[in-house]
């Protein structure tokens, strides 16, 4: 895997990231399918990918849950990017609440 430095602290980020918006819709309706999606994330981590892009709406609202399921299986450090939309989260407090919901979902 090829890495690049992020910021001044020297954090290594994989140049290849994993976008979590395109999991198969066939896998989003039951736990077995969600586990298959989580296994894709685990395989990416085991292959050296450590940068992941998620959002509350990705994969029909299941991307953060999938990411959480995968993270429970791994001990490696990963970096997760999530999003907030200004019309959904117009204030700083709204953004904070969205971020807290996202973190809670990914920890479950």
Image: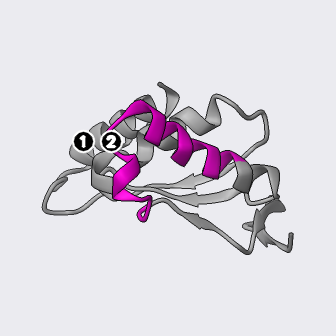
Q: Which residue is drawn at 27% across and 53% down?
A: 60
Q: Which residue is drawn at 60% across and 38% down?
A: 70
Q: Name the residue under label 1.
A: 93
Q: Write the start and end of the magenta stretch as one range.
A: 21-42
The answer to if 91 sits in the magenta stretch is: no
Q: Which residue is drawn at 39% across and 40% down?
A: 102
In front: 51, or 44? 44
Q: Which residue lies furthest to the top in this view?
A: 108
Residue 83 in the image, given as x and y percentages of width and height: 37, 58
SS class of the residue under badge 1? helix
Residue 77 in the image, given as x and y percentages of width and height: 75, 43
Q: In which quarter of the image is residue 93?
A: top left
Q: Mark 2 points at which residue?
A: 96
The answer to whether 55 appears left or right of 90 in the picture is: right
Q: From the viewer's perspective, is residue 59 above or below residue 75?
A: below
Label 1 crowding class (10 Å Cα cut-off): few <14, some 14-19, many 20+?
A: few
In front: 32, or 104? 32
Q: Which residue is drawn at 43% across and 44% down?
A: 64
The reply to whether discs 2 and 1 touch (Cβ–Cβ < 8 Å) is: yes
In front: 87, or 44? 44
Q: From the viewer's perspective, is residue 92 above or below residue 83?
A: above
The answer to whether 72 appears left or right of 87 in the picture is: right
């Amino acid at each position: 895997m090829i890495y690049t430095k992020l910021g001044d602290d020297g954090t290594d980020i994989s140049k290849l990231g994993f976008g979590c918006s395109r999991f198969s819709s066939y896998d989003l309706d039951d736990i077995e399918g969600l586990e298959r999606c989580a296994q894709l994330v685990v395989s990416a981590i085991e292959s050296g990918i450590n940068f992941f892009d998620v959002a509350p709406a990705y994969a029909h609202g299941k991307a953060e849950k999938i990411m959480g399921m995968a993270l429970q299986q791994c001990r490696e450090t990963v970096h997760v990017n999530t999003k907030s939309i200004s019309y959904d989260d117009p204030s700083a407090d709204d953004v904070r609440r969205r971020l807290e919901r996202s973190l809670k979902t990914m920890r479950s």
